Image: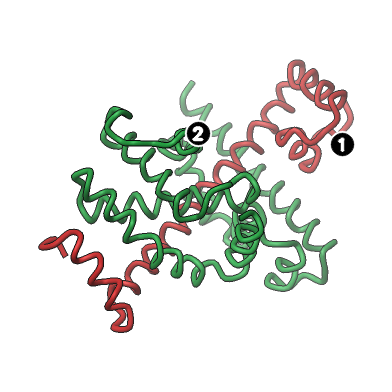
Chain colours: A green, B red
Amino acid sequence: MSYSLNTLAESLRYDREATFEKLYEQSFPTVANLVFSLGGSRADAQDMFQDALIIFYEKVMEKPDLITSSVHSYVLGIVKHLWIRKYHNDRKFISMSAWESEITIPADFYEPKESVFHLADYLAMAGKKCMALLEAFYYKKKSLKEIAASFGFSGIRSATSQKFKCLEKVRKQVKEKNLTYEQLHV
Amino acid sequence: MSSFMYDTKIIENYLSGRLTAQEQDAIAATLLKDPHFQQTVEAQQQTYDAITYFGRRALKKELKRVEKRLFSRPDKITFQQKIKKIFGYEC
């Protein structure tokens, strides 16, 4: 099983959108059935399914070996958590297996701090190329070799140094923004 | 304190717990006495949080595109009918 999840992580790394299209087609009907049986709408099902795919993606890209079930069951397990959270349902109305109840949802997923999305907006405008590079490395888990090729760096060494330069540049912008914010709110 | 402490790479390793116990402790001790260093480390953590948020938002957009394709392409009619059957009139 971990072999296939490693393969899945690979294909998500190189061809994310097409891989998600397959996953979507395979798993959405089951999720739609679950959400419908709980009294949810199609919009609920779509929204929760997409959030579940994002959470699954982050987990599989980080540590594919930690996921011991199939993608399908794992995503369904995440949707159950999202449902409980959204409708404040009591857990006893949704049957969850032991491993399902152990699935964790990242703490900042439900309510990212307001400052974070303002910051993301600001940074997206302030330095498009740097944010794209940082997203490729930290979020999409692209290899430095691939980053070098797609961003036009001469090699891994140069990609590494650009990545840290960008991190430093963005960190500086964040720091300046924090200081301005403090001055405004003293 | 030496300037290498401000290095993004060291802070990255510190924040992800990749340093040796001794190095982690040394940095934690510096954090307590150096407010500038503390601001830098906080800003770096906020940077990672913002990257995650940025990445999630982009992925959500991508998934909406996938959804739109699956629900409009004629060759995905079997999929569309499956969903229509579940929710009935809603589709």
Residues under numbered marks 1 and 2 in contact, where contact means CB atoms less than 8 Å apart: no
Q: Report, in whole angstroms, how far the alpha carbon at label 1 lies from the one at label 2.
A: 41 Å
Q: Are marks 1 and 2 on the same chain?
A: no
Residue shown at 19%/66% (left/top)? B84
- Judged from the image, the secondary structure of the residue bearing numbered disc 1 is helix
Q: Is residue A51 left or right of residue A55?
A: left
Q: Which residue is mark 2?
A: A102
Residue shown at 71%/66% (left/top)? A147
- The part of the image, by quadrant, that contains residue A161 is bottom right
Dot 1, how many residues are within 10 Å of its Cα: few (below 14), some (14-19), or many (20+)?
few
Image location of residue B24, percent across then percent down: 81, 26
Image location of residue A166, percent across then percent down: 70, 53
> A162 or B60: nearer the eye?
B60
Image location of residue A10, percent across then percent down: 64, 64
Label 1 amino acid? Phe
> A177 or B27: nearer the eye?
B27
> A78 or B26: nearer the eye?
A78
The quadrant the C terminus of chain B occupies is: bottom left
- Judged from the image, the secondary structure of the residue bearing numbered disc 2 is loop
Image location of residue A134, percent across then percent down: 64, 55
- The part of the image, by quadrant, that contains residue B50 is top right
Q: Which residue is mark 1?
A: B4
Q: Chain of mark 1?
A: B
